[in-house]
Amino acid sequence: MTSTDWPLWEVFVRSRRGLSHTHAGSLHAPDAEMALRNARDLYTRRSEGVSIWVVPSASITASSPDEKDPFFEPAADKPYRHPTFYDIPEGVRHL
Amino acid sequence: MTTMAPDTGSYEAVFDAAVAADERIEPRDWMPDAYRASLVRQIAQHAHSEIIGMQPEANWITRAPSLRRKAILMAKVQDEAGHGLYLYSAAETLGTSRDELLDKLHSGRQKYSSIFNYPTLTWADVGAIGWLVDGAAITNQVPLCRCSYGPYARAMVRVCKEESFHQRQGYELLLTLSRGTEAQHAMAQDAVDRWWWPSLMMFGPPDGESAHSAQSMAWKIKRHSNDELRQRFVDICVPQAESLGLTLPDPDLRWNEERGHHDFGPIDWAEFHEVLRGNGPCNDQRITRRRQAHEDGAWVREAAAAYAGKHRDTQGEAGA
Ligand SMILES: [Fe+2]
Ligand SMILES: [Fe+2]
């Protein structure tokens, strides 16, 4: 038996309290507990994290890069969602 | 990927435009088969080098002269294992598997850096490796942080952060020996004499003879040519050797005012190709040790998988 039987896990690390977990990389492990231990040894050897999430890579649903443009299209023509869209006279403050 | 046959041309245009705009290519993007193959070859060779590279240094862990040096060396060797794992993960995003990569290493179908086929004869070699071998690796790897393939570039950022400790501990080790007794100084000099030329070979064959260079640079996998990086490394090392109170074993090494670089003597490429062909001092030893370690670990992998399977069954979860 070899490591192909070990699923791939994505590792997310919170670098310090108050920040979100961010993707650090991936690793193979037989189960969640071992994935956590391996992630600690692999991605936090220099105190890079205070909390780790591991997620089976197979459980992630991703948007397809092929439909990138149409998928994100709805946001492209709505500049009025940004504050810079609006003209405000010089000198008006706290706005 | 799904039905792309009628449309490969436009996919290729998107890929070319992304590379031209210095954007990163990500795993699920369309990419030319040759780009994918070239990356797998390079990342696999890089990953193998990291884990084979653990051997020459691990050779000295039990004989480190102090607890401080021993702790440092263990941390460094552990880092190299980590670098191998980051890189194997990056390679796997291209559709190969960990087992396939290890198989190819063990059967000699994929290579690792020929530098690791040289033996570590004395404690000073640990210093020379840190200073010169990790130093050459850093010179190679820093530009790879901007490689066009996202997962490889990200792995390199992580690796480069960790490498600077490797180089500095080696330099400090050599400095301590160089300033020590006459015998210690001689040991440091001897190590530098043996590692200098193989380190220059780490940058690969001269530009004219480098099989993959031109295409890799067009794809922005590589950003600088072999000779360019080699020259950069030589220029960095000369003043560092002076500060160490050690010399570099090259009678032709001198500053060239006109070029603004150091000239250096010819590299023995016959030796390089011999080592590459498998006839270096330690080729057999390295691969035999690697296979042995893999076989010795088989029961651990089996036990962990069996435990995970049993746990899954009793919890009634779906198998992964
Ligand atoms: Fe490394
Ligand atoms: Fe290193």
Image (cartoon, rainbow, N blue to C red):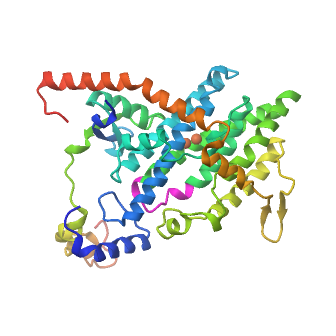
| B28 in magenta | no
- Does residue A82 appear in the picture of this structure? yes
- Does residue A79 appear in the picture of this structure? no
Instruction: State the image quarter where residue B195 is shown.
Output: top right
* Ligand 2 picture quarter: top right
At which x and y percent is residue A38? 37, 31
B163 and B56: which one is in front?
B56
Picture quarter with the C terminus of chain B: top left
Picture quarter with the N terminus of chain B: bottom left
At which x and y percent is residue B53? 57, 38
Report the residue at 60% width, 63% height from top. Answer: B210
* Above/below status of A13 relative to B3: above
Instruction: State the image quarter where residue B59 is shown.
Output: top right
Instruction: State the image quarter where residue B125 is shown.
Output: top right
At which x and y percent is residue B21? 42, 73
At which x and y percent is residue B37? 41, 58
Report the residue at 40% width, 67% height from top. Answer: B23
Q: In the shown orientation, is residue B39 left or right of residue B11?
A: right
* Above/below status of B4 relative to B97: below
Report the residue at 79% width, 51% height from top. Answer: B239
Q: In the shown orientation, is residue B3 left or right of residue B241?
A: left
Tell me where the magenta segment starts and ends, as one range.
B142-151
